[in-house]
Amino acid sequence: MPIFSLPNNYGIGSFGKESYKFIDFLKRAGQTVWQILPLVQTGLGNSPYSSVCSYSFNPYFISVDLLKEQNLITEEEARFTLSNNDEYIDYGNLYAVRYPLLRKAFLRFNRNQKDFKEFLLEQDYYDYALFMAIKFASGQKHFYEWEDGFKYRDKKTLEIFSRDYSEEILFWQFVQFIAKKQWTALKDYANRNSIKIMGDMPLYVALDSVDVWKNPELFKLDENLSPKKVAGVPPDYFCEDGQLWGNPVYDYAVHQKDGYKWWVNRLEKALEIYDLVRIDHFRGLDRYYEIDAGKTNAKEGVWIDVPSLELFSAIHQKIDKKRIVAEDLGMIDDGVRELLKTLDYPGMKVLSFAFDGQDNNLYLPQSVNENSVCYTGTHDNDTLIGLINSSSEWDLNNLKNGVKKSLELLGIDGDVQDSKGLKNAIIELGYRCKSNLFIMPMQDALGLGTEYRINEPGTIKDQNWAVRFKTEDFSKQVADKIRELTEKYNR
């Protein structure tokens, strides 16, 4: 359940009362893990996998109600930001109303608070704040379009700017301070109710980001700080041109020199705010696919080996490997499987991919091992009902026959004749399989259709990353049904 999809009156889910109510719902439902999407500040396209800063918090997740309680905004100011759109997030409207509201809160904020002063001294978000201040002063230009003094982080240029724009820099630090404080309180509430938070760490960072601006040497860039190579995946059955993501790729020869310090710090930061972390596109940490910058598709690229054992050796000196989950989906080969086995990370088993008529499908519920996380689907998949209703006659027959066979093998009674019965049967197979953890998107628990899909990869749609739930979706009846299945299968 993404934070942004939770229901409230302000156009997007937040770290406020709706998140606390969802934790209460999970507790009633007997659950122990809440998986969310990255909490980062999003950019163009609103994807949490493309952020201006890989360790930031999304300012939109700051609770308006909690700001009211602190007397940082008035009732009238909050009312101005109310949203009637309860189906999809209107990011354009959010941008127009939310930042002015946060600036009003900043003007009333007591900057002499002890915890805020300590936060400033840590300087964890100073570079983020400086980046955002320059970006706004430049008219929202990408950092690689800035004047050279800013683009290449000339010390004197930045000192003068910091002095002249100190209030703006402080505002962006305030934004992160408030967001982090609200998130920490929410996570503490979840943990006190025996619920762990599983976060998500994108493999790559955006080109126009604090991460690249601050550490350009860690990426394959030219002297103008433009990418020489970009990330993507090669052509496959689903996409004849491959996927051209455009993210700058890492220069691991440079990372190697300081013992992969950037990677270690990144995972340490992630595990400060999450209990568990899912590493997205894990296969890219064994080998990754790079394409020459400027290409219009991903047909002509090469696979590059990552010094993965050395990288993870450095990481494991600082973090508990039991807190990591690997997203091992996509083009998986023996190298990735061997790395996963060596590291002993749990991989992902997605039931939406299981029933294709092949008895050797690795996602079949009777075939998965304990050291894995089973899903009905991910944020990039259609919902179960959407998948069922959009299947061709051939695919639907494979689905029904495969589910029926798995039910028999695992000793479950189930009806696969209609969409609802088939959806319920797949969910029960997830509960029944050997995976140590079973995660179900709320869309599937509620039996919702394609209109509730979180994201359709490779598309730019207003509905991507914009789905919203309604308060009545999280009823006691739904919670009790989830608890009933959880107890039935001793999860």
Image: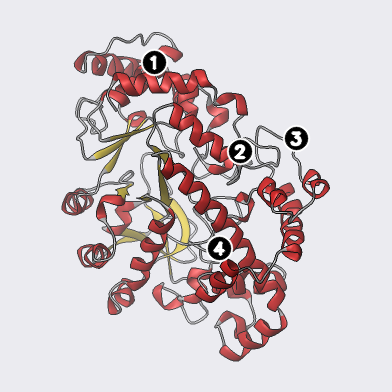
Marks 1 and 4, how far apart at CA: 41 Å
Marks 1 and 2, how far apart at CA: 26 Å
- From the top left corner, tell me how far across and down residue 475 is, in percent: 54, 22
- From the top left corner, tell me how far across and down residue 366 is, in percent: 21, 25
Residue 52 marker: 4
Q: Earlier in the sequence, mark 1 or mark 2?
A: 1
Q: Quadrant of residue 312?
A: bottom left
Q: Which residue is mark 1?
A: 422
Q: Is residue 400 visible?
A: yes
Q: How many other residues sit within 10 Å of disc 1, few (<14), some (14-19) or many (≥20)?
A: many
Secondary structure of residue under mark 3: loop
Q: Is residue 48 visible?
A: no
Q: Earlier in the sequence, mark 2 or mark 3?
A: 3
Q: Amino acid at mark 1?
A: Leu
In the image, residue 174 sits, relative to residue 276, either above or below, namely below
Mark 2 vs mark 3: give the one in front: 3
Q: Which residue is mark 3?
A: 84
Q: Amino acid at mark 3?
A: Asn
